[in-house]
Image: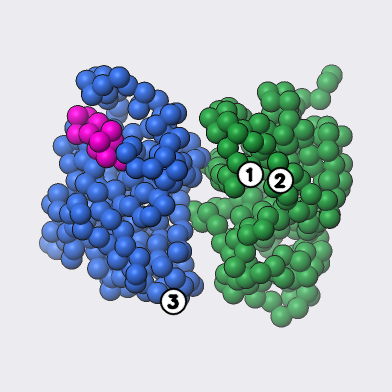
Chain colours: A green, B blue
Amino acid sequence: MIFRQLFDRESSTYTYLIAERQGGEALLIDPVLENTDTYVRLIEELDLRLVLAADTHIHADHVTALGALRERTDCATAMGEMSRAECVSVRFREGEKLRADNLKVDILYTPGHTDDSYSFLLPDRVLTGDTLLIRGTGRTDFQNGNAEEQYDSLFDGLLRLPEEMLVFPAHDYNGMTRSTIGEEKRFNPRLQVTDKQAYVDMMNGLKLGDPRLMDVAVPANRSCGLKPAA
Amino acid sequence: MIFRQLFDRESSTYTYLIAERQGGEALLIDPVLENTDTYVRLIEELDLRLVLAADTHIHADHVTALGALRERTDCATAMGEMSRAECVSVRFREGEKLRADNLKVDILYTPGHTDDSYSFLLPDRVLTGDTLLIRGTGRTDFQNGNAEEQYDSLFDGLLRLPEEMLVFPAHDYNGMTRSTIGEEKRFNPRLQVTDKQAYVDMMNGLKLGDPRLMDVAVPANRSCGLKPAA
């Protein structure tokens, strides 16, 4: 498997390029508009054909490259059925799969950070979007976020995956590039709660400011990062 | 094997935590002083014992955490015999090995960026310091850097490693986290030269400004990042 983690320093976003083999089909998860050239160049260099670019959810902190990649590479674009983004050609749902040659990526619906948050599961690793971060969890206070749903997505979902499963989030702000489910269960401070109510109280007490790009990014991302026609 | 890549956003430095197994001995390569707490916490969480912290060379763009880690964890500290750093407890040379339990890391002397630049070789990956970067090479215009020596370190050294060998550099400024020897041979623009003289001419024509922290970092790093006794 080809698995490349790419970092956008401005928004601390991780983008993932996934393929079964050199010369084959590729998926790109959570691409950032400003890095489109980098992605296209790397995809060409690795002799890959981008078949699909997908976002784990509508991001509020950066503009997606989905539309730009579709224009540049003719790839399909995908968001979850809950994303209410009319611009994409594929709207996936829990239980479906993304495919690149014989590689299958399972789709898990993991709401809480937003009501359109999904995770992508490979045999040995999971892309957790903003649901599960390394030693953190995504905020739940905008875009129909919901701390109760996030608790369920974590404790009845992601945290039931095998302990040794690698965790690759959509962001990291502290220089960490990967974790495991076991590590997060033990050392993620947000997960050391006794019950759902304690989690909800903690998340609702965070009092965070709005993301800097929110007013730009959310509407832009609903149209795949391209300006809507006038 | 445990292999963790950590990113320092301020200097775009990659630090590598390497161990054979959870509960065992660990090595830390190119640690950054400001991130010492992060390293110590992660080492504790993974139930590792830091036996040795090493720098690939005397860095000019950040202050090393070697001294701070020795004070915090009692680890050995290592730089190459060419580093002229009296502060370290181990001075390694080409052909020797770093060890963590049964894991052996081969040491290659790869001068050119500086005259004390080393690379660290594992069975499937190589830590290339500033000698070989992703789609770049380390500048050769200070700290006894030498473009001819760098050409030899690359073309008669690192680039003779197997094509599929993973490349993990000490820095990346473009969001790339890894590469391979084959990729760099084909796509690294600095390596598309016809001969040594062309490489030397290119490197000597770069006309780069000094690193921002150079006047602070180089003397500090010669004393392992700790202030010399008055």
Circles 2 and 1 on the same chain: yes
Density class for disc 1 (Cα within 10 Å; few <14, some 14-19, many ≥20) is: some
Q: Say which of B198 and B210 sits in front.
A: B198
Q: Position of residue A11 (x, y in %)?
A: 59, 43
Q: Chain of mark 3?
A: B
B147 relative to A175 in the view: left or right: left
C-beta proximity under 8 Å, tags 3 and 1: no
A21 relative to A199 in the view: left or right: left
Q: In terms of secondary structure, what is the magenta stretch mainly?
A: helix
- Which image quadrant is residue B75 in? bottom left
C-beta proximity under 8 Å, tags 2 and 1: yes
The magenta stretch spans which residues? B147-158
Q: Position of residue B102 (x, y in %)?
A: 34, 70
Position of the C terminus of chain B by quadrant? bottom left
Mark 3 and mark 2: span between their CA atoms? Answer: 36 Å
Q: Is residue A11 visible?
A: no
- Which SS class for mark 1? loop
Which residue was labeled with disc 1?
A20
Density class for disc 3 (Cα within 10 Å; few <14, some 14-19, many ≥20) is: some
Amino acid type for the residue under numbered disc 3: Gly
Which residue was labeled with disc 3?
B23
Which residue was labeled with disc 2?
A102
Circles 3 and 1 on the same chain: no
